[in-house]
Image: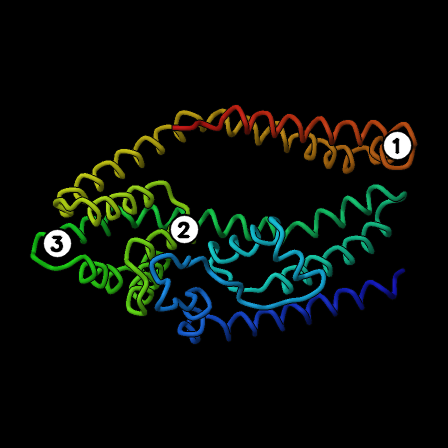
């Protein structure tokens, strides 16, 4: 098993370098190609009924194609776009498979038995999914922080007599990632014939922010029944700021409970490390004795359940 580990590590590093090079080549240098992939062709006969759901960037067959057509594959594909990581599903699966093999090899060397190596391999395999989730949440949070200022700029532009499209152009020029590029995509889709309300709905799919949904609804209502869009957007900016202040107040009030949850989850790990440094014989029983292994498995399960329960109790819907 020992000669097999350097091979796995080498393949993993090589695949990471290849994917990094590919991600650079599909970054800002190929925005036109990215826009073409995200905007389908609209026929002249059914332009009013044609859906603008983003088409898959890469066509696959076999198992990968099946994953694209299933809900997990669509969820991962959408999450990659929402996180700003323009990788294909096949590339993510390759990274997960390599991490799984590496974790399995390391787990067999460090632990004994079949459950712990499998747990280590599964833990490493889900690291790409965790990274995508963190990038997605961070990007959506950055978008939400920029949105009130963009609404103020759009309101000022409308009050000055400009159209909504011109107001969006000003927003694109003044704001950086992620709000600026997202509104730029909306403008580009409008230029190729997609109605502006539907372009905003498509942006809402790429950036599922609750405050953004209010803007989409406001634009759709104004398009259908007509009203003062500047006044609506100004009021909407006040509502978004109020919601953000409420969100920060909730995080401040639950900070102590969240810190307690983190402490409850990490304290057993720190205690185990401390005992390993002070009295290694106590820890060896947990990993080598059959009864110790059962106790360790039970403790891990209870610890995970406690963390999930605390996390669910602190989730506030408003």
Task: Residue 80 in the image: state x and y as whole percent.
Answer: 52, 57
In this view, the mark in front (2 or 1) = 2
The reply to whether the C-beta atoms of the residues labelled 1 and 3 are less than 8 Å apart is no
Asked which quadrant contains residue 318, the reply is top left
Query: Quick one: 210 or 149, which is closer to the camera?
Result: 210
Is residue 129 rendered to the left or right of residue 199?
right
Q: Residue at x 87, y 33 (%)?
A: 281
In this view, the mark in front (1 or 3) = 3
Q: Residue at x 82, y 42 (%)?
A: 116
Task: Residue 79 in the image: state x and y as whole percent.
Answer: 52, 52
N-term mark: 3 or 2: 3
Marks 1 and 3 sit apart, C-alpha to C-alpha, by 71 Å
Q: Which mark is residue 285?
A: 1
Marks 2 and 1 sit apart, C-alpha to C-alpha, by 50 Å
Q: Which mark is residue 198?
A: none
Q: Work out whether 160 lies above or below 287.
A: below
How is colour applied across the structure in the image? rainbow
Q: Which residue is mark 3?
A: 158
Is residue 204 rendered to the left or right of residue 2?
left
Q: Quick one: SS at disc 3? A: helix
- Count of numbered labels shown in the rendering: 3
N-term mark: 1 or 3: 3
N-term mark: 2 or 1: 2
Crowding at mark 1 (Cα within 10 Å: few <14, some 14-19, many 20+)? some
The reply to whether the C-beta atoms of the residues labelled 2 and 1 are less than 8 Å apart is no
Q: Quick one: SS at disc 1? A: helix
Query: Quick one: 255 or 184, which is closer to the camera?
Result: 184
Is residue 126 rendered to the left or right of residue 280?
left
Crowding at mark 3 (Cα within 10 Å: few <14, some 14-19, many 20+)? many
Task: Residue 285 in the image: state x and y as whole percent.
Answer: 88, 32
Q: Which residue is mark 2?
A: 207
């Amino acid at each position: 098993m020992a000669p097999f580990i350097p091979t796995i590590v080498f393949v993993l590093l090589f695949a990471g370098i290849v994917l990094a090079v590919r991600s650079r080549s599909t970054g800002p240098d190929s925005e036109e190609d990215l826009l073409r992939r995200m905007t389908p062709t609209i026929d002249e006969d059914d332009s009013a009924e044609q859906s603008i759901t983003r088409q898959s960037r890469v066509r696959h067959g076999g198992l990968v194609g099946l994953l694209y057509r299933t809900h997990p594959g669509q969820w991962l594909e959408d999450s990659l776009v929402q996180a700003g990581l323009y990788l294909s599903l096949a590339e993510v699966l390759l990274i997960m498979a390599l991490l799984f093999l590496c974790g399995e090899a390391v787990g067999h060397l460090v632990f004994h038995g079949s459950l712990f190596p499998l747990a280590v391999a599964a833990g490493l395999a889900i690291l790409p999914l965790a990274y995508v989730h963190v990038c997605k949440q961070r990007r959506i949070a950055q978008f939400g922080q920029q949105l009130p200022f963009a609404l103020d700029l759009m309101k000022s532009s409308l009050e000055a007599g400009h159209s909504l499209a011109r107001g969006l152009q000003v927003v694109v020029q003044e704001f950086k990632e992620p709000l600026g590029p997202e509104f730029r995509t909306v403008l580009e889709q409008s230029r190729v014939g997609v109605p502006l309300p539907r372009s905003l709905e498509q942006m809402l799919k790429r950036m599922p922010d609750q405050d953004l949904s209010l803007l989409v609804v406001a634009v759709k209502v104004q398009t259908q029944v007509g009203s003062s869009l500047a006044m609506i957007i100004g009021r909407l900016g006040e509502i978004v700021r109020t919601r953000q202040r409420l969100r920060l107040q909730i995080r401040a009030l639950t900070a102590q409970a969240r810190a307690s949850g983190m402490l409850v989850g990490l304290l057993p790990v720190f205690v185990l490390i401390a005992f390993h440094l002070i009295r290694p014989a106590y820890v060896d029983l947990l990993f080598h004795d059959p009864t110790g292994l059962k106790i360790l498995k039970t403790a891990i399960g209870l610890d995970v359940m406690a963390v999930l329960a605390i996390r669910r109790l602190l989730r506030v819907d408003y």
